[in-house]
Amino acid sequence: METSVKMIIEGKEYEFPVIEGTESEKAIDISNLRAKTGYITIDEGFKNTGSTTSDITFLDGEEGILHYRGYDIEDLAEKAEFLEVAYLLIYGELPTVDQYAHFTQEIKYRSLVNEDMRKIFDGFPVNAHPMGVMSSLVVAMAGFYPELSKDLSPEALDLHIRRLLGKFPTLATWTYKKSQGHPPNYPKNKLDYCENFLNMMFALPVEEYTVDPVVASALNKLLILHADHEQNCSTSTVRLVGSSKANLYSSISAGISALWGPLHGGANQEVLEMLEEIMNDGGDVQKYIEKAKDKNSGFRLFGFGHRVYKNFDPRAKIIKKAADEVLEKLGINDPILEIAKGLEEATLKDDYFVSRKLYPNVDFYSGIIYRALGIPTNMFTVMFAIGRLPGWIAQWMELKEQKQAIGRPRQIYTGPVGKKFVEISKR
Ligand code: ACO
């Protein structure tokens, strides 16, 4: 491997070091490019730009590999609990029995939300999108912990991490309960993380609700699969906001807003709405494939394609299998699943999709499971956010340790030059 690369600019040769990661990825370190040469780089959409080195997540888009802290995603999704994975992402190692007991207990004790938050929440209209509400409530949490900006000791940060992990599912269920006109449920400490969320979502004051272990286990798997994905749009947002030394709550709130977009986490809602549309339109998948191929239609097949995965999304493979299992165990015969399978099969044979390496992504099958679990469509992206929360926290913590400079990209100005001000009466 090269240890440095040479660049010739205006006839002068410059040398830049090469960095190599533990999985043999290579990067040219251009941190002093502008200082040395007066040039910057332009890389729209950051398709070739690494914003950081990171010890947290590795993915290989060509091979369809995803590792958290060196552990394979398939292994974790099969064998671990979501909070175990959260611990792994945030603290770097899987917890021991004692560490895990302490961590989960601490999170449980932080799951109650200050009743004054309800006053903020009550101000939202009933049909407000839950992602907007979540983003607002998370940044509002900063107002409840004003000591946050002063005390950045590890103990204080641990407390905020546990607060966020504890309260986030509680807040998420508030948005659903309000949409149904039902009273919110308080968390129950005897339940684990997934059971507690399901209980707060679906229990009613008028009858007993027992969490179905099949549903809890499927949710656990989905949350693990979503827990981190290196420098994607929302995570980069969290890091960029965090780089200004903004607090953890405001950085996470910004990440939630970024995740909401339909090209990112919002795609899971779009996928299901698209599949429903295809079904209601007679189930002709080919018609929608042709529409997606027509550049003038402005239509894309949601749930297909990925910025990094140009082979297959390993998460989609696991989720597809899980969707089959969950539907079978719950005895659900969902015609949407058949539409989804038909769409996948047809695209795999279609040169447009094959040549552009557009395979189903994580969002393609997750909506089908969420639907089977009884989660309403407009909550799908919130489910993604519950899963991604530990990843955002881990990346924010890493950024803090790295003591990076504030994130501040450059630009090349292409606007007008040398204009002279003309008084308004003379324009
Ligand atoms: N349907 C039809 N055509 C598509 C699709 C799609 N879903 N995705 C990409 N293409 C086409 C583009 O039109 C483009 O064609 P061209 O080369 O003829 O111009 C080519 O494939 C490359 O697409 P880009 O948009 O340049 O690829 P990029 O890496 O920038 O985008 C993205 C990736 C945003 C995920 C894109 O594939 C997309 O919009 N997919 C649908 C939305 C979606 O499912 N998002 C979720 C991603 S996963 C996540 O965030 C968790």
Image (spheres, rainbow, N blue to C red):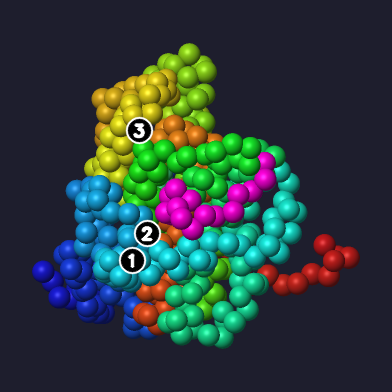
Name the residue beneath numbered marker 2.
83
Q: Which residue is mark 1?
A: 100
Question: The disc labelled 1 sits on which kind of residue?
Answer: Tyr
The answer to whether the residues at label 2 and label 1 have Cβ atoms under 8 Å apart is yes
The Cα–Cα distance between marks 3 and 1, rounded to whole angstroms, is: 28 Å
Q: Position of residue 260 (x, y in %)?
A: 53, 50
* Residue that sits furthest to the top in the current view: 282
Few, some or many residues within 10 Å of mark 3 (<14, 14–19, 20+): many
Residue that protrudes farthest toward the right in the picture: 425
Say which residue appears at 59% left-offset and 58% top-offset: 135
What distance separates the C-alpha of mark 2 from that of mark 1? 8 Å
Residue 13: image tag: none
- Relative horizontal placement of residue 252, taking residue 8 as reference (left or right): right
| The quadrant where residue 80 appears | bottom left
Position of residue 418 relative to residue 185, above or below, is below
| Residue annotated with mark 3 | 326
Q: Is residue 246 visible?
A: yes
Secondary element at image label 3: helix
